[in-house]
Amino acid sequence: MATPPFLSLIFMFIFYFEIACGSAISSVTKGTDISNLQTYIIHVEQPEGRVFAQSEDRESWHRSFMPTTTASADKQPRMLYSYQNVISGFAARLTQEQVRAMAEKDGFVAAHPERILHPQTTHSPKFLGLHQQLGFWKESNFGKGVIIGVLDGGVLPSHPSFSDAGMPPPPAKWKGRCEFNLSDCNNKLIGARSFNLAAKAMKGGTAEAPIDVDGHGTHTASTAAGGFVKNADVLGNAKGTAVGMAPYAHLAIYKVCFGDPTDDCPESDILAGLDAAVEDGVDVLSLSLGGDSVPFFKDSIAVGSFAAIQKGIFISCAAGNSGPFNGTISNEAPWILTVGASTIDRSIISTAKLGNGEEFDGESLFQPVDFPSTPLPLVYAGVNGKPESTLCAAGSLKDIDVKGKVVLCEGGGGIRRIAKGEEVKNAGGAAMILMNEESNGFSTEAEAHVLPATHVSHAAGQKIKAYINSTATPTAAILFKGTVIGNPLSPLVASFSSRGPNLESPGILKPDIIGPGVSILAAWPFPLDNRTNSRSTFNIISGTSMSCPHLSGIAALLKSSHPYWSPAAIKSAIMTSAYTQNVEGKAIVDQTLQPADVFATGAGHVNPTRADNPGLVYDIQPDDYIPYLCGLGYKDEEVGILAHRKIKCSDISSIPEGELNYPSFSVALGPSQTFTRTVTNVGDATSSYTVTVAAPEGVYVSVKPNKLYFSRVNQKVKYSVTFSRTGSGTKVGEYGQGFLKWVSAKHCVRSPISVRFK
């Protein structure tokens, strides 16, 4: 699929993430126009031979780069953060002229204006095979002793999902703090901090406390590590026990996104949150946040997370919500687990029944028991021919007679689905049928609409439009069927889930994995805003923001079960154990109901139990990324920004992207290419594996050796893979896909293959 020309308008996603340490300092410049201050991220070298004993020493070094001025205080350039862990540098409010002057100073490396990034259950544990009384969940102690840092829009500390009943104190290594009243934090919610200096500089006043004002942060935190809460539901649907992936893990909250909704997440605040999380001692970082593709050394999430993996911290990030278009993936760096979104097998069904007897199942959370099931007049919102009416945009239905009728609205136009229902309700409509735009196909979501509604597929919408045009008196009824378990097409890749290929590093296949991200139930800080006046403390929402914390929690379980595994080993275990078939045993499909490609699924859907015992892992140490980064063509100082030290690529044996010891293969294929991989035995001491290859069409794949033998745990064995074009003359497209797997008596270690034909 080609990337559409309007992609730049939809390319930012909703996610979150953090980093801390710093202080605000003022300074200024004589004769400089400082009316256009903006926040810059500035990278500087550490002075040769100097070791900073205290954070104040490093801050003093950073302050030496700042200009001086006699301007009034409100117009002064000022340092926002002096970073201690994640980059060698600081964030400051400066003009372009001041940055140019700073670049002349010894020790200056680079500077760039900060980007503004954006943010992206009762049943998902069971769908993932996690059972309270037996199996991996119990054997991993439910994540006991692991600290998950959630970088998002804050949290509601009083929510029952964050009760510490049965929780032990945090590990002795924990150094974080609580910026709520101390009584609001406990052995579950062990820390909460807010980093808002850049947001304040940009917007003016923002809330100081790390309180959640829109629900996103509370939802993601409870998805990762919320405790068991019985009798949860949303508007009477999806009833059961709400629980996160790692219910005995500790939570540390870092608020870096602000506004209402909290959709602005300045990079310097993000870096400050991450800086703090590394210093505080977290084990896993969950970042439901991201932006468009940029070089890794200009991507603060990539830079900060590289420093985190150097400390052994696992990083899980959302893939983005700009699907289903190719090349929209966010968080592309290979040291990050990039998570796409898929459905679970639960649906909240509401059905549109037409006057001709046809029925079309859709979804809605709001299912009032008092709404009549008798047919009502049905009208198409675009009957007047105006595009804005077709989309049920605000104010667009005021001249259309919709009173007491069921209104068919089309999706899209950058208008929230719930807002379309609000327009129908405000115009006097009785109910809404919301049809997908073509690109979203069969991918629907259950949402808390403000009136009786059903969200149906594009195909269903087209048939409903045809029915309206076929009769002078079209009618429809909305029938509510509640919670239904067992959708055979699950997991289905959500249409919104961003797709590869990886634009910044095409030799690394992204996303890495998919996980539950559609209609996910989790904690919510306030009642849902609709006419039921529900006091529900849970909500069901969708996004890769929801799939990311699922994987963060699963990583915490694996960290608890295997405390000495590296971040790369945990990532490999998750990827190579993934499954690629749906509930009915067929290939996972996308929103078109056709098999999803590797740019949608990555390695496949997460399988926590199998990830706990993967047999083999593809391990990578932090320094192994340096030859890879040099091989990308980055300059010495650019690699140094990521490595957090001086790098000279001419002294390093650079490697092509495909040579990184990654658990998947992404090949730009000319005549022939050979790559090596090293696998580490984490299964039985004595074991053997035989290779099986499903080669992409038009490609010959040769693996040497074709059998691997192990005699001890942690033994490492190398193999090589050669990719070459076949001489069959078969016509192929731009891309091909397949897989390679190593099979033993107990294990199947699978790696997806993507090939781009040059």
Image: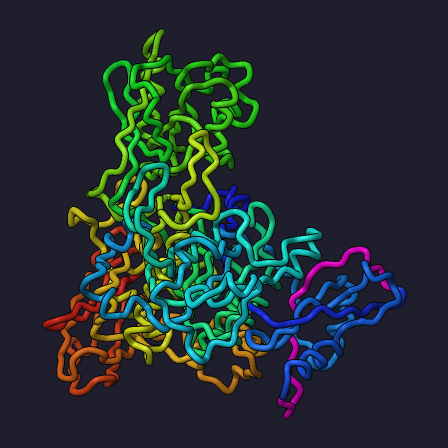
Q: Residue furthest top?
A: 472
Q: Is residue 49 magenta?
A: yes
The secondary structure that dominates the magenta segment is: loop
Q: Is residue 261 above or below residue 146?
A: above
Q: Read off the magenta span.
A: 32-51
Q: Position of residue 597 (x, y in %)?
A: 30, 51
Q: How many marks?
A: 0
Q: Residue furthest left?
A: 745
Q: Is residue 435 above or below residue 657?
A: above
Determine whether, in the image, residue 323 is placed left or right of residue 574: right
Q: Position of residue 369 (x, y in %)?
A: 32, 26
Quadrant in the picture for residue 43: bottom right
Query: Which residue lies at the image location 48% right of the left edge and 27% below the top edge?
Result: 391
447 or 622, which is in the foreground? Answer: 447
Q: Is residue 37 magenta?
A: yes
Quadrant in the picture for residue 674: bottom left
Determine whether, in the image, residue 240 is placed left or right of residue 383: left
| The C terminus sits in image quarter | bottom left
Determine whether, in the image, residue 593 is placed left or right of residue 743: right
Determine if residue 672 is in view: no
State how the image is colored: rainbow
Query: Which residue lies at the image location 32% right of the left edge and 68% below the top edge?
Result: 143
Determine if residue 225 is in view: yes
Determine whether, in the image, residue 372 is placed left or right of residue 628: left
Quadrant in the picture for residue 282: bottom left
Query: Which residue lies at the image location 36% right of the left edge and 47% below the top edge?
Result: 521
Q: Position of residue 226 (x, y in %)?
A: 38, 58
Q: Position of residue 100 (x, y in %)?
A: 76, 68
Query: Which residue lies at the image location 29% right of the left edge and 52% below the top edge?
Result: 124
